[in-house]
Image: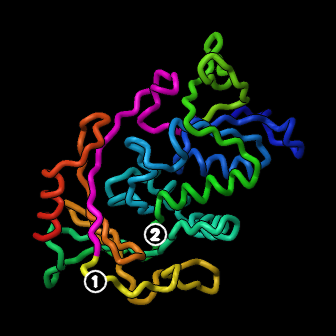
């Protein structure tokens, strides 16, 4: 964003920001830009936050942390930590405005040094009590609903490309139609090349299983958190924490289900689940 493009009080003269991609990154960017007074348009090739082919915002586990943090650069962890402190307030505001619960939970993260489930006597693990999670599809639905309430133009089932003239971005193009924008934000993930850029982002396939309890658990009062005096949510008494092992992770959900993941596969845009991955994940969990 160029320095002179500052928002104004008049929505008709405020700088126009075109966002390509309607996942969590695109929608949350639209949310904050709109709040700062910019005119915002969102273009999504499928449905915002929907079960589009390969869409990470639909299928991700929703853990608001690097897994594990020790394997990521300090700058990445600093950015994640900064972002994580804002999720609770964002989800609370979205719930109040739209009635859609993004299922924000402070679960805690237990990092196990070995693949075996229980910690043996004398074995040390790492526990990070403030790690939280969200339900990705619900967060996307809440963001999209809140943006529509603010009058943000959301164009679904619309493939947008960067509109360049002599190497200078003019906005986006929908087919042969050009839509002018002061700034274009690309939030297309691995589909960066479809937006008409020379940037390359490689897709990584991850398969996970959702395990349901044999008997229906007694649902906890939503949300399964309590408030500190500061208003910061913390993990509810007795709530299970996220478990991270060298070979897999387990993410407990509010409804009693358990997410078991994840494979890491360099297979392009293939999204088909495989029996081999299912067997490997179950074996990791039972070992």
> Which is in the foreground here, disc 1 or disc 2?
1
What residue sits right under mark 1 in the picture? 215
Badge 2: few (under 14), some or many (20 or more) residues near its Cα, within 10 Å?
Answer: many
Specify the quadrant that holds the N terminus. Answer: top right
Residue 150 vs residue 162, the one in the foreground:
150
| Extreme-top residue of the structure | 166
Q: Residue at x 24, y 36 (%)?
A: 267
Judged left or right of residue 150, residue 243 is left
Which image quadrant is residue 116 in? Answer: bottom left
Residue 136 vs residue 244, the one in the foreground:
136
What residue sits right under mark 2 in the picture? 132
Instruction: Give percent across and percent down for residue 107.
Output: 42, 75
Instruction: Give percent across and percent down for residue 183.
Output: 68, 31
Instruction: Give percent across and percent down for residue 87.
Output: 57, 64
Judged left or right of residue 95, residue 72 is left
Specify the quadrant that holds the C terminus. Answer: bottom left
Q: Residue at x 72, y 32 (%)?
A: 2
């Amino acid at each position: 964003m160029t320095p002179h493009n500052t928002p104004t009080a008049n929505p008709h003269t405020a700088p126009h920001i075109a966002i390509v991609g309607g996942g969590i990154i695109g929608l949350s960017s639209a949310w904050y830009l709109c709040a700062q007074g910019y005119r915002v348009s969102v273009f999504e090739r499928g449905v915002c936050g929907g079960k589009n082919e390969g869409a990470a915002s639909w299928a991700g586990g929703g853990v608001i942390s690097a897994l594990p943090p020790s394997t990521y650069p300090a700058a990445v962890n600093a950015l994640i930590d900064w972002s994580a402190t804002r999720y609770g307030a964002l989800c609370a505001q979205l719930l109040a405005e739209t009635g859609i619960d993004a299922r924000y939970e402070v679960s805690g993260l237990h990092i196990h040094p070995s693949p075996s489930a229980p910690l043996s006597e004398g074995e040390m693990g790492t526990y990070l009590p403030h790690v939280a999670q969200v339900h990705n599809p619900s967060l996307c639905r809440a963001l999209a609903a809140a943006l529509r309430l603010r009058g943000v133009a959301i164009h679904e089932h619309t493939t947008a490309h960067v509109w360049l003239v002599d190497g200078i971005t003019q906005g986006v193009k929908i087919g042969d139609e050009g839509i002018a924008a002061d700034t274009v934000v690309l939030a297309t993930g691995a589909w960066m090349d479809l937006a008409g850029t020379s940037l390359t982002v490689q897709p990584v396939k991850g398969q996970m299983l959702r395990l349901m309890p044999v008997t229906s658990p007694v649902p906890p009062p939503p949300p399964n958190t309590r408030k500190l005096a500061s208003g910061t949510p913390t993990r509810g008494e007795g709530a299970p924490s996220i478990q991270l092992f060298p070979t897999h992770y387990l993410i407990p959900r509010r409804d009693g289900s358990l997410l078991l993941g994840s494979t890491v596969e360099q297979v392009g845009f293939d999204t088909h689940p495989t029996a081999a991955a299912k067997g490997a994940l179950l074996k990791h969990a039972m070992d």
